[in-house]
Image (spheres, grey):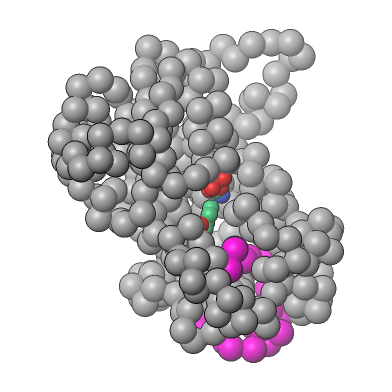
Amino acid sequence: MNHFLDIHKTTQSDLRAMIDQARAMKDARNNRPKGMRDDETPLSGRLIALIFEKPSTRTRVSFDVGARQMGAETMVLSGKEMQLGHGESIADTARVLSRFVDLIMLRTFEEATLLEMAEHATVPVINGLTDASHPCQIMADIVTYEEHRGPIAGRKFVWSGDGNNVCSSWLHAAGQFGFDLTFTGPETLDPDPRAVAFARERGSKVEIVRDPLEAAKGADAIVTDTWVSMHDPESARERRHNQLRPYQVNADMMGQAKPDSLFMHCLPAHRNEEATNEVMDGPHSVIFDESENRLHAQKAILRYCLGV
Ligand code: CP
Ligand code: NVA
């Protein structure tokens, strides 16, 4: 039984196998004869619980569709409607759900909640985003980068904006897949130093550059995310906007990157805030491929966790 809790907690060979399997499953599905049904249903007879304590469109739909395509049945649960949201402990919830379902995917606030679920569950647990990381997203993003531009190892990624949960998973991925990452953003929103240290320990060059145009020079990809995440207090909105506005990804910034650079964003986007529409809908943008690839990445992660 394998949990999928974070990119830095999964072995390099397992991560690479999942990326390659996701791409192979995508190719097989897209190239099947018209009208053919899926004949590969390795999850047949399995039941999967998808628990959301925060909103979701992509994670919810991609896990649900991916699991069904592989023959599983799914149950989408809202944390608020469960006893979990009314005082039942995480440990007891994990023990009870493990008696019913074959796998639990959890989107929650604190990382500690996810870890407690994994500790007490006797079935695999997948991290569907916490305040600290978003590993499923970055697996899909690696699929996306590599299908457009080939191996990610040795590339220069630039993260512009808030050093948030998605940024941490990019740093974990830099360490595991062997690419470099330059962070550009205000000092108060620097990335988690543990994620920076992890990437550096694994040999990645991680730089912090305050000038966004300087940071973007020679980038293979520029990545950003919302200025206000689901875990950020509403009261911080105005301050964050003021701090992050200089780090908007726009044509000037993309102009510093390599001519064949990609623009990436996990979505949902706040258009003309963290990136201009010109960039989001422009020739470098692969944002909707990233969304689509959530499906293929999720399927590989489910198979890894269930050992099929
Ligand atoms: N990128 C992402 O996780 O999107 P959702 O919040 O819609 O799931
Ligand atoms: N950083 C964002 C990512 C959403 C997919 C958030 O946590 O709200």
Q: Is 218 included in the stretch rendered in magenta?
A: yes
Residue 302 against residue 32 in the figure, above or below: below
Quadrant for residue 226, please give it: bottom right
Nearest the viewer among 59 and 182 is 59
Q: Is residue 242 visible?
A: yes
Q: Is residue 11 visible?
A: no
Quadrant for residue 272, please give it: bottom right
- Please name the residue shown 62% across and 81% down the image: 242
- Please name the residue shown 54% across and 84% down the image: 186
Nearest the viewer among 260 and 277 is 277
Tell me the quadrant of the picture where the N terminus can be found.
top left
Tell me the quadrant of the picture where the C terminus can be found.
top left
Segment colored magenta: 207-227
Q: Is 14 included in the stretch rendered in magenta?
A: no
Residue 199 against residue 127 in the figure, above or below: below
x then y, percent, for residue 127: 37, 46
- Please name the residue shown 68% across and 83% down the image: 246
- Please name the residue shown 68% across and 60% down the image: 270
Nearest the viewer among 148 and 99 is 99
x then y, percent, for residue 85: 29, 41
x then y, percent, for residue 134: 45, 54
Query: Is residue 282 left or right of 247 when viewed as pictured?
Result: right
How many marks overall? 0
